[in-house]
Image (cartoon, rainbow, N blue to C red):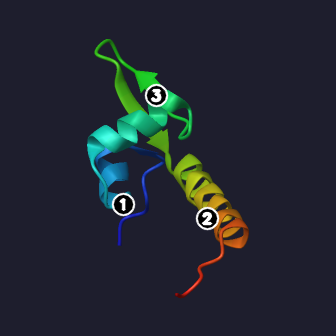
Amino acid sequence: MAPTPRFLTLADVAEILNTTTAQVYALVRRGDLPAIKIGGRGQWRVEATELESYIERAYDDTRAFVKDHPFVEG
């Protein structure tokens, strides 16, 4: 089994999060998901540890939302 690469493309991140590359690009451009721009053509890369941190923050945000907005069955 190959080790996880240190840096992921936006397409890699989109596949992991099961979303679109455009959505990942929006996360990067808003500053929600830290990334670096490399090379003359400006290829974006997300460090795997930054993606894991983003996922943890998303879980924390979701827990807070659920706590503040409890589901009420009607």
Which residue is labeled 2 in the image? Answer: 62
Which label's residue is closer to the chain start, 2 or 1?
1
Give the labeled residue for mark 1: 16
Kindly state the secondary structure of the residue where label 2 is placed: helix
**Any part of residue 9 in sight:** no
Q: Quadrant of the N terminus?
A: bottom left
Q: Amino acid at mark 3?
A: Arg
User: Nearer the N terminus, badge 3 or badge 2?
Assistant: 3
N-term mark: 1 or 3: 1
The amino acid at mark 2 is: Thr
Up/down of 59 relative to 54, above or below: below
Nearer the camera: disc 2 or disc 1: 2
For mark 1, give the secondary structure.
helix
Q: Which residue is mark 3?
A: 29
User: Disc 1 versus disc 3: distance between alpha carbons?
Assistant: 19 Å
Q: Residue 68 vs residue 34: left or right?
A: right
Q: Is residue 21 left or right of residue 36?
A: left
